[in-house]
Image (cartoon, grey):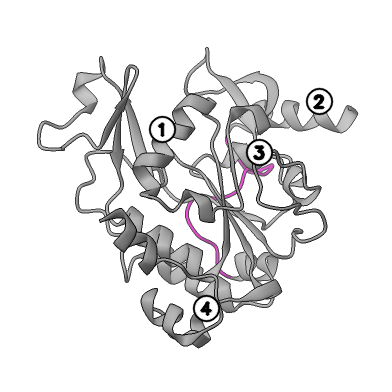
Amino acid sequence: MSEKLKGKVECSGNNSSEANECGLPLEKLNLGPRKKLLVLSLGGLLCHRVHRYERANIPSFRYVDASYGSFRVYKRPHCEDFMKFCLGRFDVGIWSSAKEWYLDNALDCVMKGLRSKLVFAWDQVKCTDSGFKTLEKRDKPLFLKELKKVWEGKCSKTRSSSTGKYSSSNTLLMDNQPYKALLNLPHTAIYPAEYKVDQVNDMALGPKGELRLYLDGLADADDVPSYVKKHPFGQPAITTAHSDWGHYSKIISRFQKD
């Protein structure tokens, strides 16, 4: 079964037979240097992680896709097809603020043999610790995802150096927590609503889902910032208008001083 799946998602070539195997017309495949980079979060976008003691948050009708330590992982509907879709149109990296052991195991569950096609898979080590705590959990460190690390090629798990290949013009971060992008340039990220395990009828990653349609348009756009500015999606970015700007402005000020 895994070999069959692997054959169907080999989307990196330039011939029409591979395009057909991906289920995409050749003109829809972004090939060569024109590909933009998608940096996807893991939890809240592709899956939902629940601690096994949080029984109230675990629906009895949901089958557990994977268990690691004290956590249970539930894949988002259509996540595997969504990853094939993304890999056919973009270069793709995964960036999680979770620890390495969880990232490795969760990717095996979510990606189903597609991990080797990622440009990189980053965990908490690649995040920037802001020195502050999150507002939703006062004991949880607030981690940031600085895209400049990607643009500077600071990758330990890449197939090749990305220095100079990616920039603010061709990179999009997707994360359900807007504060992760506090230090990034404007219009280089979108913030979809968080996926949770009880959303069994969620279609955002499906064939005509809102995320697929959005990314389909992005793939054909001239550049990322112009497209994001013209087509706002999901939660708004954190600006001076945010109700908790007092908290987040302290984080920005700290790093501006550095």
Q: Which image quadrant: the C terminus?
A: top right
Q: Main secondary structure of the magenta part?
A: loop
Whether residue 127 is visible, yes or no, is no
Q: In the figure, is residue 61 to the left or right of 54? A: left
Mark 4–mark 1 distance (CA, rounded to whole Å):
29 Å
C-beta proximity under 8 Å, tags 4 and 1: no
- Dot 3: within a 10 Å radius of its alpha carbon, few (fewer than 14), some, or many (20 or more) residues? many
Q: Secondary structure at mark 3?
A: loop
Quarter residue 73 falls in: top left
The residue carrying mark 2 is 254
Q: Residues within 10 Å of mark 4 (few under 14, many from 20)?
A: many
The range drawn in magenta is 231-243
Earlier sequence position, callout 3 versus callout 2: 3
| Rendered image: mark on residue 221 | none
Which residue type does callout 4 highlight?
Leu
Q: Amino acid at mark 3?
A: Lys
Q: Secondary structure at mark 2?
A: helix
* Residue 84 to residue 177: above or below: below
Q: Is residue 126 visible?
A: yes
Mark 4 element type: loop
Q: Which residue is the extreme one toward the left?
A: 61
